[in-house]
Image: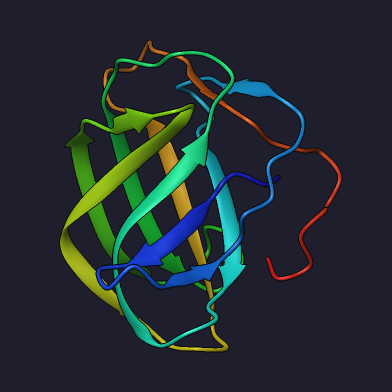
Amino acid sequence: GSFVAASSASGGQYDQTNESGTDTVYPDGGAWQSFTCGITGSLSRFEWAAPTSFSGMVDVVLYSGDGTGGTQLGTWDDVTPSSSLGWYQVALSSPVTLTSGQQYTIYLESSDGFSEIPMYYSKINPYSGG
């Protein structure tokens, strides 16, 4: 899948800006996207593009490596994303340091257990870094 654009507090972009296809993530499954970090720095927020509106809260987990089997580096519960021009942004209350060249995974699911999370994503693999 392809849904995450991660960036640093200083505005530098870590990786992953593809947006293609659409789907809705249901609360029982969540969604994750791995990415290869392009710069060393502190991850303070991430964004996803969505075809429709979303007004719920999300839970976020950051893992080391590709997929959700790695070490949990951070968890954030009941976060309300902000939105602008079809993009939803999650600000992380406690930033995490990422290292250039390393792979990480962001996992996202609905906090309330019933809201659907709209997002652009692709079942093919248009992004080779994660």
Q: Is residue 11 visible?
A: yes
- Above or below residue 7? Residue 22 is above
Residue lying furthest front in this view? 85
In the image: residue 39, left or right of residue 61 = right
- Above or below residue 25? Residue 40 is below
The quarter of the image holding the N terminus is top right
Residue lying at 57% horizontally and 88% vertically, measured from the top left? 101
- Above or below residue 33? Residue 84 is above
Q: Nearer the viewer, residue 88 or 58?
A: 88
Q: Nearer the viewer, residue 84 or 73?
A: 84
In the image: residue 14, left or right of residue 41 = right
The quarter of the image holding the C terminus is bottom right
| x, y percent for residue 14 | 49, 72
| x, y percent for residue 64 | 46, 73
Residue lying at 25% horizontally and 68% vertically, measured from the top left? 9
When asked about the image quadrant of residue 54, the answer is: top left
Q: Nearer the viewer, residue 124 or 7?
A: 7
When asked about the image quadrant of residue 82, the answer is: top left
Q: Is residue 70 visible?
A: no
Which of the colour schemes (rainbow, by chain, secondary structure, one colour) is used? rainbow
How many labels were placed on the picture? 0
In the image: residue 90, left or right of residue 102 = left
Residue lying furthest left in this view? 93
In the image: residue 10, left or right of residue 105 = left
Residue lying at 34% horizontally and 17% vertically, measured from the top left? 113
| x, y percent for residue 87 | 45, 34
Q: Nearer the viewer, residue 103 or 44?
A: 44
When asked about the image quadrant of residue 102, the answer is: bottom right
| x, y percent for residue 25 | 56, 24
Residue lying at 34% horizontally and 29% vertically, measured from the top left? 83
